[in-house]
Amino acid sequence: MRALLVVNPNATTTTERGRDILVRALRSQVDLDVAYTQRRGHAADLARGAARDGLDLLVTLGGDGTVNEAVNGLMTFDSGPAANRAQDRPALAVVPGGSTNVFARALGLPSDWAEGTGAILEALRDRRERIIGLGRADDRYFTFCAGLGLDAEVVRRVDQARHKGSTSTPWLYFRSTMGQFAATNRHVPLLTLELPGESVQSGLTWMLVQNTAPWTYIGERPVNPNPRASFDTGLDVLGLRVLQVAGTTRTVAQILSNRHEAKGKHVVALHDLPGFTLTAAKPIAFQVDGEYLGEVDKLDFASVPGALRVVC
């Protein structure tokens, strides 16, 4: 089996010695090449090249941003018929190397890179794979979530803090969330959701789209705004019409309880959607899989079933 390991050298959970151990362990199972990312978007280029070269397996060591880039590279290597066949692309194995590792954990892998490596080696020996669906926003694929509004603005704040030397921690996300919530005009509706053949949902201030659950983790605790979301179904959405303090606090408490779906007169929750369009009254912050992508005023979302083979 021919494989490529794509390493983000900024992976937070491994040292150089740990990466050497990972490489030796993988080489006991596969014919392995190793490549290090050098810039934003490089993981997509490397994954696209691995697919074009006919490799059997792509392994990533990094966080959810590295995984997202690699997935987009795999999904866009060919515009012909093979672009629609998961079996014609390399399988993906994810070694957790970021601060949260939502995608790896959603696949049932441990959050520790060493334990995750052991689980992947065992899966390779047993030839354990599954095929999962992805989400797509215009031409950008995502593995577990996309967001417009508050959460994307929080991601932007966290990115800015990290570029200034801060470490990505739950406390950094909490501070960024509180700061952004205070700065946001919480009463101005920006977003409209259009479903083919159905009534329009308008007057939304924030929208979260999930391809699977959970949305994220706080430490070891999963956060499930759309608990029915799954790699095996369409997209789930949760939108809020106004971000008032009392209503938003109640919604957050419902989400964190992990016992009930968010409900209320200001909540829009939809399950298993094949596709929809979101439009904004003015450009609004946008993120996929925890990566800030700028501001947009319209996005066409689609569920892409049976898109990717993963080792799990």
Image: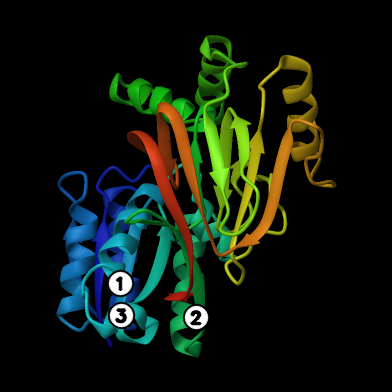
- Can residue 56 be seen from the camera position used here? no
Numbered label attached to residue 58:
1
Residue at 39% over, 27% down: 156
Residue at mark 1 to residue at mark 2: CA–CA distance: 14 Å
Residue 148 versus residue 221 in the image, above or below? above
Residue sticking out furthest to the right: 259
Along the polypeptide, which appears first: circle 1 or circle 3?
1
Tag 1: residue type? Answer: Leu
- In the rendered image, is residue 57 in sight? yes
Residue visible at 57% across and 24% down in the picture: 189
In 3D space, how far apart are the residues under numbered discs 2 and 3 (Cα atoms)?
18 Å
Of the residues under marks 1 and 2, which one precedes in the sequence?
A: 1
* Residue at the image position 56 percent from the left and 43 percent from the top: 193
Residues under numbered marks 2 and 3 in contact, where contact means CB atoms less than 8 Å apart? no
In the displayed structure, 198 sits above or below 205; it is below
- For label 1, the crowd category at 10 Å Cα-Cα, with few meaning under 14, some 14 to 19 and many 20 or more, is many
Q: Quadrant of residue 91?
A: bottom left
Quadrant (top left, top right, bottom left, bottom right) of the N terminus: bottom left
Q: What element carries label 2?
A: helix
x and y, in percent, of residue 287 in the image: 42, 40
Residue of label 3:
89
User: Is 236 in front, or is 60?
Assistant: 236
Please indicate whether residue 33 sits to the left or right of residue 288 in the image. left
Give the mark nearer the N terminus: 2 vs 3.
3
